[in-house]
Image (cartoon, grey):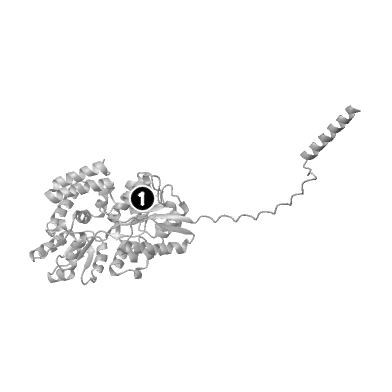
Amino acid sequence: MKKFSWSLISLLMLVAILLSACGGTPATEAPKAPEAPKAPEAPAAPAKSQVEVFSWWTGGGEAAGLDAMIVVFKAKYPDIEFVNAAVAGGAGTNARAVLATRLQAGDSPDSWQGHAGQELIGTYVKANQLAPLNDLYKQNGWLDVMPKTLIPLISEGGNIYSVPVNIHRANVLWYNPKLLADNGVAVPTTIDEWFAAMDKLKAAGVTPLAMGEQWTAMHLFETVLLGSLGAEKYNGLWDGTTAWDSPEVKQALEDYAKSLTYVNSDAGSLSWQDAAQLVVDGDAAFNVMGDWAEGFFRELKKAPTTDYGWAPVPGSVGVFQFLSDSFVLPIKPKNAESATAWLTVAGSKEGQEAFNPVKGSICARTDCDPKLFGEYLQSAMADWGSNVVVGSLTHGVVANDSWKTEINNALGVFLTDKNVDTFQSALTAACKASGPCK
């Protein structure tokens, strides 16, 4: 009997344990109320796309032109935030130094400004930092609206590497119309006509040619090379088909040496603005400078065709020696689609028509509306669409930084000793060291 009682008790305890394990609620606990369902969480707002654009346009017409193009960009791509990463100072020198540091650290902007040509190709393409843009050109039909002679100057190995947003002209001869008329001098079209005109002016006590500091001497140098050699042989200097030690180049260097005999004696102490102002003030007859000089003349309240006239540098009629601000696409942008959107606007008719009249340059495209531009820029626009296009040395198109530096060093010596043979030897050596003559 005692044994049966303990067995019954054990069985009852086992049943209780099993009921508890199966979720039974003890009689002493009140049943729990069911939990209210949670409200669904609102989805996080998607992060706004960005495009960081790096330039050195921080003031004057440059910044205003960029702002005008940003307005076009925001209207077309309202969901993309434009981050203006401009760096001021040094006409781009400071910006390029900052950019170099960022690229080395792997912190590339989505797009950056540079001078079209070897300044970009010889630096960033060579370092495998830029992506080709052939597909973008084809998609937007840009090959049909930019001069065919331009494309090779912004290309390497069959790939196009930048989107030019504007064009400046380097080979411009600015002149004082009254001085020429008073001295019976016609606007020269050839090198020989130019020298004859300057001889006549010099004999009359007029300073024939205004020039400034050394970079303006390089600017004169490249335009005289172009005028003396012609477009084909000038281009050959930069691709290796024209020998720097050839008789034709020696003649061009002698022409340059002769042009220097007509310049103002204080050239080395003047800025380009000082030299250009000598012309509009009537203190010199000619000045060779890029067409940004026309913007300076307008700031001085001078009138085109009355206070100043313009023509291609003698010997270069029918040739447009260009430089261009361009934007690029890095190999690995943080925001690839946004970067492509920016480049699309930069190359568009609408974007360039907004930018250039404010900047004081012309469109890289040939289909912009001339009515948006002043008298000089309209003439430049007509020439850009019809002339043979060649690149500038001084302004980054035809030579990489290393080669340009060696040329500049040789020029500095020549400005002191005026020895054409030594100058030609130094230029030949520079081509072998840093150019295509290796």
**Can you name the residue that lies furthest to the right here?**
1
**Can you name the residue that lies furthest to the front here?**
2
* Relative to 101, 416 lies left or right: left
Place residue 214 in its image quadrant. bottom left
The residue nearer to you, when weighing 71 against 38, is 38
In the image, residue 291 lies at what x, y percent?
Answer: 26, 62
The residue nearer to you, when weighing 178 against 62, is 62
Q: Which image quarter is the C terminus in? A: top left
In the image, residue 205 lies at what x, y percent?
Answer: 8, 65
**Residue receiving disc 1:** 155
Against 16, is 236 above or below? below
* Relative to 323, 33 lies left or right: right
Mark 1: secondary structure:
strand
Place residue 70 in its image quadrant. bottom left
In the image, residue 7 lies at what x, y percent?
Answer: 86, 30
Residue shown at 56% from the left, 55% from the top: 44
* Relative to 428, 24 lies left or right: right
Give the residue type at disc 1. Answer: Ser
In the image, residue 331 lies at what x, y percent?
Answer: 42, 47
Q: Which image quarter is the N terminus in? A: top right
Against 20, is 52 above or below? below
The residue nearer to you, when weighing 93 against 341, is 93
